[in-house]
Amino acid sequence: MIDIYNLLAEIVGEQHVSNHKEERYFYGCDPGLTPPHEPDYVVMPETTEEVQQIVKLANKEKIPIVPKGGGLALTGLVIPQKGGIVIDMKRMGKILEVNEKSRYVVVEGGVTHGMLQNYLKKHHPKLRHSIPDSPAISTVVGNAVIHGQGRLTQQYGFNSDMVSGLEVVLPTGEICRIGSHSISSQHWFSKGAPWPDLSGLFLGWFGTTGIITKLGLRLYPCKKMRDVMVFLTDKIELVPDIILKLTHTEMTEDIVVNEQPLPPRMKGNIYILIIITGDSDEELDFKRKIIWDALWDIFESRDGGFLSVPADMKPPLLEMPSRDVVRFADVRKGGGFEYSGPIIPLEKYPEFITKQKELVSKYNLSYSATSRVIAGGHCMMYAFAFTFNRADPDEMDRIRKALREAAEFTVEQGGMMWKPTIEEQKMIIERMDPNTLKIMKKIKELLDPNGIMNPGNWEA
Amino acid sequence: MLQLNFDPAKCIACKTQDCLVKCQYLRLDKDKAKTEMQKIINGEDSFVLHDCVTCYACEEYCKMGNHPFYLIVERQEGRGILPAPRSIATMWINQCEPRGRFTVGKVKERALSFCFIPIFPLWATGKLFDGIASSYIMGEEFFCNAVFLHYAKMSVIKDRLPKVIENIAKLGIKELICLHDECYGTFNSLAPAYGMKVPFKTTHYFEYLYEKLKELKDEIKPLNVKLAYQRPCSNRLSPKTQHFVDDIFNLIGAHRVKREYVGENALCCAEVIRMGQGYKIADDVQKRNLEDMVKAGAEYCVFNCPMCYLSIGDKVSKRGLKPIHIIDLCKMAIGEKTAPGV
């Protein structure tokens, strides 16, 4: 019988592999509602070649593999449903290159958003990347693989749209370069265009088609100043129009829409956070006025207005990532947090918020509805976010039911579930165009003939 | 039901109509002012009700104490006229609702009111507050609610203020030193205007600081700086407290610069105007105000209200002036460290 543990230890060194109960427990769960399932081994490679050797071993022995970044998707995407090997990418934490002229960075698969944020601040202060509101330990690759969003998503699209190249270890062990660096190893400026964009074979697949070991990411100008404006309205039906008007200005960095009953000052209103940037007071002032003017008719009708935000209130609103999101995640205490964050057409916002309120009332839940505008308002992420106490199984059950209903509602309304749970993936697959499903299946079979990669996910 | 103590006869007999003629935002001559005021008294519509920026100043302009501003607010609410968007008013109503989260120190007969402004406990320290710092009240339960004058919500004030007075009285407080100018104005103008009895003495913190500085006279080192004073809207409800600004400045050896926008002609911080009327008027008011301070040669802008400080402190700094609250200024004069900024 093959001793997998020793073979893994030969690849990465004994201190970087474990089959101990403690590690297996830890790597078998996430903060959401998906039931835990332990892996057999946890391994932490340091190089692409080590990843390659692990994958080759697993493919030969038909052992399931789950690549793991920060493990913060909350929907069970890195819970090893069929055991096997969890590959924790944290040791691949090098920032390999920053190209200031073409504005991109190349990072290894375990680099976190916090690491990149600090690195750029220190070494390249004129550049920034799109920081999600997940904790700083979330990884750049993990976030791209789930089509995450961040502080520049309103301007430039999903964080995955900002990818400028990939290095992937395929399930059969080959190392594959995607994008401009496939013909020139020095250049990571494009993930595909003007040729076939093969990054789509890996982004959004939750690690079922390969392991991303390096990633190129577009960087953007880091303006000297940022400011926040807060627009309040009590008319839900006006929100799509407000966003349309705001995005028409092309002046905003980020637009986030919040609706929640607590703290009390937030009750009864929709809070629209508008972030603007500039290199001078004059530039900021100009943008402020344009934004005011864009919403002037709503202001005059008294259906909405700008809150005067005192200087001491601004830092938490401008903070990246926002600590308030993490605070909300534990508002019930007991360490439970999950949300379904469908991507929805802008005009559907009122229906979704109405549905959320219905679910909250039906299942007696604590909630927050935070939405982020994507790519100039072509769509938005709407978070049915619920926090719960892990020691309260009844509450967890109610949230499970609420999220299930939210997912069904999303599909009915034409939305797309973001980072869907396995159950939600099945729901999607059932409703998907058969030919689309056929393509997905062919891709999966072609790339992962032995079905070892993150099994249970996207099983077309 | 609490009724406003407003005498139409006094208003009709008024020879100046200063309440509206002196308004810094509306242009009315005496005759027009009389006509519009008559409409307001009669409960009819008037452009004044729509265009009022809620600066409180007409309360001060009326030398008969007839409360024209409170009447305007009543009429705005009665006619459903919104001086600011509904959502802003809703936010304030929810934020200021008493929820049992107040804090009460070792309250004695003489106590400080911190309103529910969290910076006050940090300011009320050192020799100026020796012997009284621990005797304080803070929280929505003690909040004067005058802010609702800006949102045509007199009903909220009438609903909440009597309970606030009762809450304070229940603590056995005989003298309340109001650190928030607006609280003092509320207890000495708004409450009596509606016949609410305030069963404790109220002292404006200006007066308290002045008396305390006199006690600490030997420790004062003249500051010899030039100051502009930012008068808040709420001070229109208690104009008699204004002389303490000069009294304090004289005691600490500071010089108040001569300004156009001073006293009755003072300009407010304009952030409430921004929320209700938009950025154009607000920017204009702030620009004129700050330019006046600079032109007058001020080195410091001295604040009374923390909200004014929060609203325009940064803008003051950018114009080269140092923003400072008057409590901190007094601390500087007696050689104490100033508290953290707002």
Image (cartoon, coloured by chain):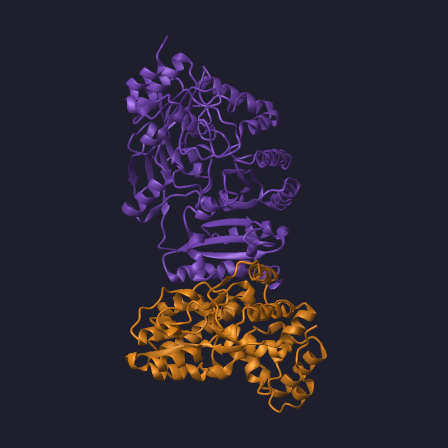
Query: Where residue A287 sits: x, y (%)?
Result: 45, 58
Q: Is A456 above or below relative to B151?
A: above
Residue B297 visible to the viewer: no
Q: Answer left or right for B249 relative to A382.
A: left
Query: Where residue A23 sits: x, y (%)?
Result: 39, 26
Foreground residue among A307 and B233: B233
Query: Where residue B162 sits: x, y (%)?
Result: 62, 70
The orange-tinted chain is B
Identified at 48% across, 19% down, the residue is A82
Query: Where residue B62 sits: x, y (%)?
Result: 58, 85
Residue B288: image quadrant is: bottom left
Q: Is A40 above or below relative to B263?
A: above
Identified at 37% across, 74% down, the residue is B128
Residue A314: image quadrant is: bottom left
Foreground residue among B340 and A214: B340
The purple-tinted chain is A
Name the residue furthest top.
A1
Q: Answer left or right for A135 relative to A456.
A: left
Residue B103 visible to the viewer: yes
Q: Quadrant of the C terminus of chain A?
A: top right
Q: How many marks?
A: 0
Q: Is A278 above or below relative to B204?
A: above
Q: Quadrant of the N terminus of chain A?
A: top left
Foreground residue among A25 and A283: A25
Identified at 33% across, 79% down, the residue is B216
